[in-house]
Image (cartoon, rainbow, N blue to C red):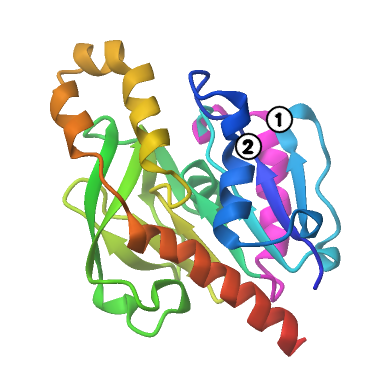
Amino acid sequence: MKPVLIIKTGNTVQSIPREKGDFEQWIAAALDIDEEKVLVSNVPAGELLPEYGVVSGVVVTGSAAMVTERLPWSEYAAQWLRGVAGTDTPVLGICYGHQLLAHALGGVVDYHPGGREIGTTCVTLTDASTGDPLCSGIEQQFTAHVSHMQTVIQLPEAATVLACNSFEPHQAVRYCSNVWGVQFHPEFSEEVMLAYLKERSVKLAEEGFDLKALLESVEPTPHADRMLKNFSALIHATAQSV
């Protein structure tokens, strides 16, 4: 199988020890793909993205950057993603990656009018998720770790909402036949989510959050985790059908 490309758009919070890894390590582990079969392109560091035909799947990571900043590396990645959306290669965007895909494909991204969403939350699958391979075997209501301030305000044409909650209407989206995005972080462990809450504790207090309640609500997210396993299965199935 050709390598799976992880487009690295940022780093995790500084309080997480480096030996614990970063977005790309957590994603690769969740996909259960051998290290030699993973290609990482750190686009903020100036690394170029490969030709479309040399990868079997693509995952776009989260980032502390904002899509609305229109940073040169981000716009470069968006242009590349517009191209890969026209192929058969499976693509999954996570948080910033999800928003970047929406922007690349004609949607609108901006700050969420309700402010920040962070912690472990409940997400509900929509009726449209029935039969979608990313949602296979996932309960209609499941827990997921979230940390974002921006959101997809307007979906691109032909996009389908697969999951939502009372705060975020676009928790999971299928943009086209081979492209998905999730606003939550299926690669986050409980330890990682707790680290995000603690590192942002001052800002959260200023914004009126109950930090103690947020910390106590952190719990396992097995069904969100399963989405990455489903995506891995989709990559393998697509590779075998070529």
Q: In the image shown, does 74 or 46 lie closer to the viewer?
A: 46
Looking at the image, which residue is at 73% across and 41% down? 76
Q: Which residue is mark 2?
A: 9
**Residue that numbered label 1 is attached to:** 44
- Which residue occupies 64% across, 28% down? 71
In this view, 31 is above or below 185: below
Where residue 113 sits: x, y (%)? 25, 34
Residue 198 got which mark?
Answer: none
For marks 2 and 1 on the same chain, the one whose residue lies earlier in the sequence: 2
Q: State the residue at coordinates (79%, 62%).
A: 3
- Which quadrant of the figure has residue 109? top left
Q: How far is disc 2 from disc 1 in space, using C-alphas?
A: 6 Å
Residue 111 is a magenta residue: no
Q: Is residue 50 left or right of residue 23?
A: right
Q: Secondary structure at mark 1?
A: helix
Residue 191 drawn above or below residue 50:
above
The x, y position of residue 27, in whole percent, is 58, 51
On the image, the x and y values in percent for residue 233 come to 58, 75
The amino acid sitting under disc 2 is: Thr
Q: Locate residue 207, reporting x and y percent.
A: 20, 17
Q: Which residues are magenta?
A: 67-89
Left or right of 58, for residue 183:
left
Q: Nearer the viewer, residue 186 or 110?
A: 186
